Amino acid sequence: MNVVHPIVLDVDYTVSGRDGRLVVGANGSLAHNGRYTLSIGEKATPAGGNAQLRIEVVKHTSATDLPLNLYKLEFYKAEGIIDAPIQTASCLTFSNNTDMVISSSLEVKGNLNVTQGNSSINAGFPAQGSLRVTGRVLGNPNALRNLNFANVIVDGVNIDCEALAPLPVELVSFSAKYDNKQVVVRWATASEKDAANFSVERSSDGKNFSSVALVPAAGTSAARREYEAVDHSMRSGLNYYRLKQTDLDGTFTYSQVIPVQVGETAQQLEAYGSQGSLNIVMQTPGTLQQLRVLDAMGRVLYTETLSDGATGLVTRTVPMTGGAENRVYMVQAVTSQGVVNKKFMTVN
């Protein structure tokens, strides 16, 4: 199958068989229209020939084009090369020793499942491309070691991929900033479909949120819409904000969480998240020199040295591996003003 112009996927589609192959050209794209899955099957070896790639996505003129914008994507013993940004509205699965080269961005708005064998990305190549997972990394606890991306962010949101529907609202920006004794929250949408409202939610610990503002949505719109809400009731120190978007039928989705520092503060370290990833938020008036994560036995699981240092608010998302049970860890931040430690427990 050669995709040379925009195509809407309105059925489940599998690339398999002796000669099955998907090639998305520079002007082609494949977008979802409902809860449909694109499955890339096992690499095939035609009679008398060499094994061929199951999927190839070439570079597009614009670095922001999405040649693959799917609901769900599955790879099974697949080999391929992807040189342009792709994303899924739900989950993505690598299984049975899938071997891919992905040089651009991969965004998974559900969970990333890595099962049945040692699948690898960019094996034998320098780290390249980027991976952003809204949900969690499931399956093989050591999966991230074989995914050789230059940048990896795992938000760790608990997501049920079977219940996750394509988002009716395309959120293109979300920000929050402390200014003149208030926090101003701004966001913009590129399109909306049957959207009821937006709720701005705030938390003091990054886990428990409550609504501080409710803003009506446009309903259905194909034009860019910009929104703003103001929070006057925040506390001093670190506050966390997220956006809850609710549809007319009552279904809802959340944005990423954004930390905001309110007022002056001494050094402050926070850690939150779940199995699969850890979010670290460090506030210091000095210079942050090193971050470390240790297990309960004092063994170093993650370390990052900031050669040039960083001042103010510093955030990191660290992929974590391990069993499904709760575990206790220690986050340690070394700054020019001393060492700050924070003990935390991951949750299922």
Image: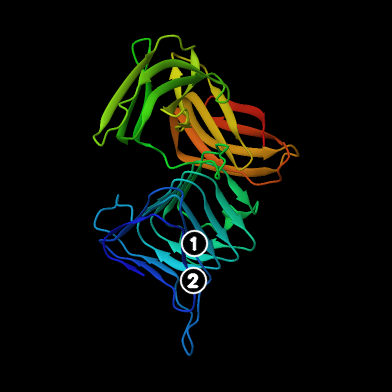
Is residue 97 or residue 270 the one in the foreground?
97
Task: Tell me the quarter of the image containing the C terminus.
Answer: top right
Judged from the image, the secondary structure of the residue bearing numbered disc 1 is strand
User: What residue appears at the point 43 percent right and 27 percent down from the top-left corner?
Assistant: 246
Going from N to C along the chain, the mark reached first, 1 or 2, is 2
In the image, what residue type sits under mark 2?
Ser
Give the total of numbered labels.
2
User: What residue appears at the point 61 percent right and 63 percent down from the top-left corner?
Assistant: 118
Q: Are marks 1 and 2 in contact (CB under 8 Å)?
A: yes
Task: Tell me the quarter of the image containing the N terminus.
Answer: bottom left
Q: Is residue 23 left or right of residue 299?
A: left
Q: How is the image coloured?
A: rainbow
Judged from the image, the secondary structure of the residue bearing numbered disc 2 is loop
Q: Is residue 24 left or right of residue 144?
A: left
Q: Which residue is mark 2?
A: 16
Q: Is residue 330 left or right of residue 68?
A: right
Residue 15 vertical position relative to residue 133 in the rendered view, above or below: below
Judge the density around disc 1: few (<14), some (14-19), many (≥20) Cα neighbours within 10 Å: some
Q: Which residue is mark 1?
A: 39
Determine which of the numbered discs, if any, sits on residue 236 in the image. none
Judge the density around disc 2: few (<14), some (14-19), many (≥20) Cα neighbours within 10 Å: some
Q: Position of residue 265 (x, y in %)?
A: 49, 15
Q: Position of residue 14 (x, y in %)?
A: 47, 65
State the separation of the CA atoms marked 1 and 2. 8 Å
In the image, what residue type sits under mark 1?
Ser
User: What residue appears at the point 45 percent right and 70 percent down from the top-left corner?
Assistant: 54
Is residue 6 or residue 226 the one in the foreground?
6
Q: Position of residue 26 (x, y in %)?
A: 27, 63
Q: Position of residue 233 (x, y in %)?
A: 45, 9
Is residue 130 or residue 262 the one in the foreground?
130
